[in-house]
Amino acid sequence: MSNPNDAQQQQQVPEMSEAEKQNKIKEYSRQGRLSFRNFAEHQLRNEFKELAMEKCNLQIKAFAECGKEEGLMVIFRCQEFSKDVKECMAVHNSQAAWERYKQLHDADLQQRVMRSKES
């Protein structure tokens, strides 16, 4: 028999840190300065980066866990985890992968440009 509190804990979304909130604020202010095409491409690029981070989530979590355990020695003792993250991101967040993603989502990009111009 499952505990109802377990379901509630699993559904809770972690709150954003202060740094993440500041980053979102910067992101929104930057978006106002972009041209229609650049704005749409910028949004698409952000989605692409989020997907890359999701694909490398295991490596990122392992590095974060190592960092928590090692503290200030993270630079020396977590190099292998850092290397794994960099390798994964190099594959999923490369310029070639971005170009492929942009080509696959070209129709969506054009649609976003048109919506941006209408607003």
Image (tube, helix red, strand yellow):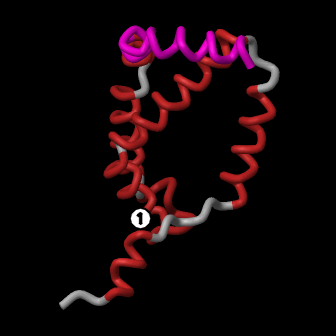
Coordinates of residue 59 in the picture (x, y in percent): 34, 49
Q: Residue at x 53, y 23 (%)?
A: 44
Q: Which residue lies under the disc numbered 1?
A: 65
Q: Main secondary structure of the magenta part?
A: helix
Quarter-wise, where is residue 2 in the image? Answer: bottom left
Quarter-wise, where is residue 29 in the image? Answer: top right
Coordinates of residue 49 in the picture (x, y in percent): 48, 32
Of 110 and 31, nearer the camera is 110
The vertical placement of 53 against 68, above or below, is above
- Left or right, 34 with respect to 8, comes to right
Magenta stretch holds residue 90 = no
- Name the quarter where the N terminus is drawn: bottom left
Q: Which residues are magenta?
A: 100-119
Coordinates of residue 104 in the picture (x, y in percent): 36, 13
- Determine the residue located farthest toward the left in the rendered image: 1
Of 98 and 73, nearer the camera is 98
Q: Residue at x 34, y 86 (%)?
A: 4
Magenta stretch holds residue 104 = yes
Total marks placed: 1
Q: Residues within 10 Å of mark 1 (few under 14, many from 20)?
A: few
Q: Residue at x 74, y 12 (%)?
A: 35
The vertical placement of 8 against 32, above or below, is below
- Left or right, 61 with respect to 25, comes to left
Secondary structure under badge 1?
A: helix
Coordinates of residue 91 in the picture (x, y in percent): 34, 26
User: Which residue type does callout 1 highlight?
Assistant: Glu
- Name the quarter where the C terminus is drawn: top right
Q: Residue at x 42, y 21 (%)?
A: 94
